[in-house]
Image (cartoon, grey):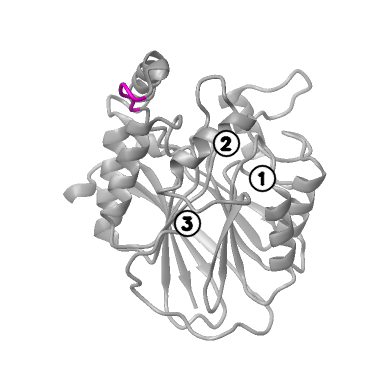
Amino acid sequence: MKAGRWKRGIGAVLTGILAVSAAGCAFSRESGADQGVVVHEETVVIPKLEEEFEILFLADTHISLCDDRDPELLEKAKARYEGFREESGGTGADESFRELMAYVKEEQPDLLILGGDIVDSAMWASIDLVQEQLEALDVPWVYGMGNHDFEYGGEYYTERAYAEYLPRLSGVSDTRDGFQVMEYDRFVVLVTDDQCNRISEEAAEKMEQLSEGEKPVIVVTHVPVEPSGDDSLWEETKKVWGETEDGRSRVLLGPNSCRPDETTQRFLDAVLREDGRTALVLAGHIHFYHRDDLTENLVQVVTGAGFEREIVKVTLTP
């Protein structure tokens, strides 16, 4: 996590039974520096919270700026840049990111979470822009890895990608073991990195530990969790992203999608356990907004694409 100015404080340690609820709506900002930003609002109840705490969450800006420091990716970056600009209706991903950061500056949240695929590859020009914009903010932020942030041409989750290209992002992310934690007096935020539809052993262990604790946990995972009771997200992802030969979603984590390995299943079990502490799951990856119930008392909010200037505003309230 990169430090910024704290707007508000939070009280002492939570005790007692967790009760959570969430509700949301969406609207477009129409004026000021944030014109065109689409904000999806959610509210989560955190028992005994002394005052409201605001989180802004975004993912999938896919910034594809490249210069002569990365000559081997110039053609790919140009094609990706134009593709995302066309998909967004004519706005470049770098322009969208600047507009989102202008909105963050105006809103002054207590925490900004960047949920992965902020840069489309680990190109210096893209990383420089993101670092410049984040360092100009007066709020704390945390940046988790998606499946694109440190890929580099044919290097996709390879040893070289981890050794040479992930370190390029060290100026914007403190990730080391596949997760980052921000602990507050009344709740915890756990941001996990995507590892090709997998969660690291260290992240799974941390989630298991937090699920046994007293504080509610806001869980961030780049790839959304497949809901067990509502098929709407599962069906929609298959329409948008296609499906495997045996009818699985290609872009969710779950038994009917990308099958979790043993470690990732342990993570999911800890997130979803009925007597656990998860208060909200935030995800990205699929490029469209969706809100669904993972369990009777647990909501997952998937943000729309950042390159289309979408962002989620979560208000934690007593």
Any magenta on residue 67? yes
Q: Residue 75: where, in percent of width, then height?
A: 38, 13
Q: Earlier in the sequence, mark 3 or mark 1?
A: 3
Q: Dot 2 lies on which element?
A: helix
Q: Amino acid at mark 2?
A: Ala
Mark nearest the camera among 1 and 2 is 2
Q: Can you tell which mark lies on residue 24? A: 3
Q: CA distance from mark 1 to mark 2?
A: 28 Å
Q: Dot 3 lies on which element?
A: strand
Any magenta on residue 167? no
Q: Earlier in the sequence, mark 1 or mark 2?
A: 2
Q: Dot 1 lies on which element?
A: loop
Residue corresponding to mark 2: 163
The residue at 49%/84% (across/down) is 11
Q: Residue 183: where, in percent of width, then height?
A: 54, 70
Q: Is residue 298 above or below residue 53?
A: above
Indicate left or right for 309 with 274 as reference: left
Q: Can you tell which mark lies on residue 180? A: none
